[in-house]
Structure formats: C-alpha cells, structure tokens
Image (cartoon, grey):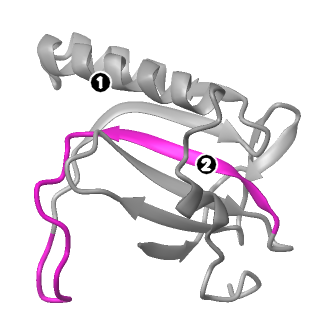
Amino acid sequence: MIEQHVRVRNPRREFGRVIVANGYLAVWFIFRGKWYDVGKFYDRKGKPTGYYCDIIRPVARLLSATSKTSIVTDLFLDLWISREGRCVVLDGDEFDSALAKHTISQTLASKAQLELRALIRSARAGSFPPKSIRRFQPTISISEP
C-alpha cells in the first residue's frame, strides 16, 4: 500500500463532480499476479470519491523491504469507479496511441481489454473493489499538503 497526497494541474470531474484535485489523498494497492492496481481517492474532507484502477502487467514480486523494488508496467487503460459503483473507462486515447505506435503488442492489448471488461463486470456486480479496500481508512492525515 502506498499513500500519497495528489498534485494535479486541473481537477478531474466525472459524473458531475470532482473526483481528483490538489490536496486529495490517494491510497494505492498493488496485488501480486493481478492485472490491475487500485487507488482509493479521498477529498480534502476525508470522504472517498471513488477508485482508480490501472490495467497493468501482473507484478511477480511485491516489495519486501525498502531496499527492494517492484516494476509496475502500465498498459494504458484505466477505469474510474464512483462510490456508487458507476464506471467510466479512462485514457482510451493513450491506449489507442500505444497500440498504433507498437508500444504495446496486439496480444497484450487484447489481454488488457479483457481484464478491463472483467473489472467493469465485477464493479457493476458490487464485488469489486474488494471489501478490504472499500473498508480501508488512511493512516496519514487527509489535510496534509
């Protein structure tokens, strides 16, 4: 898990409300062997705004010590899940560009799309993100800069 205060040029809006802005808190969860990571976002008052999911290559090894590293490879497709479970696919243009430039293979792109569709189905069914993430409370202050 990684906790960080968000710094963005412009606030991001989805479904008629701000979901990410300067000073918001993001808590990231990375899972070994999964095709996604999950960021739980909180506004400046500590209220969750939703979940940001990057489609990634599965991480084979997670950090076991501060002197170790894990490589996370973003596959350009992202998903926002609102507090109510509504979904919107993000960065489709980046994905299309990466595919056109052969930054990502057609095989890997197909797998990324398959995983994205599976996450959407799970989110709509109410089984994603996992309960452990939905119940998680940050350990650092929301109001810290």
Residue 80: percent from the left, percent from the top? Answer: 61, 37
Corner quadrant of residue 138: bottom right
The residue positioned 13% from the left and 14% from the top of the image is 107
Picture disc at residue 4: none
**Around disc 2, counting alpha carbons within 10 Å, would you say few (fewer than 14), some (14 to 19), or many (20 or more)?**
many
Residue 51 is tagged as: 2
Q: Quadrant of the C terminus?
A: bottom right
Residue 90 visible at all: no
Quarter residue 45 falls in: bottom right
Relative to 40, say whether 96 is above or below.
Answer: above
Residue lying at 23% horizontally and 20% vertically, measured from the top left? 111
Q: Which residue is mark 1?
A: 112
Q: Which residues are magenta?
A: 47-69
Q: Position of residue 84 (x, y in %)?
A: 79, 39
Give the left or right position of residue 38, taking residue 56 as reference. right
Above or below 49: residue 126: above
The earlier-in-sequence mark between 1 and 2 is: 2
The residues bearing labels 1 and 2 have C-alpha atoms spaced at a distance of 18 Å
| Helix, strand or loop status at disc 1 | helix
The chief SS type of the magenta part is loop
Q: Tally the marks.
A: 2
Image location (x, y in percent) of residue 22: 70, 65
Q: Tell me where residue 139 appears, x and y as whole percent.
A: 60, 87
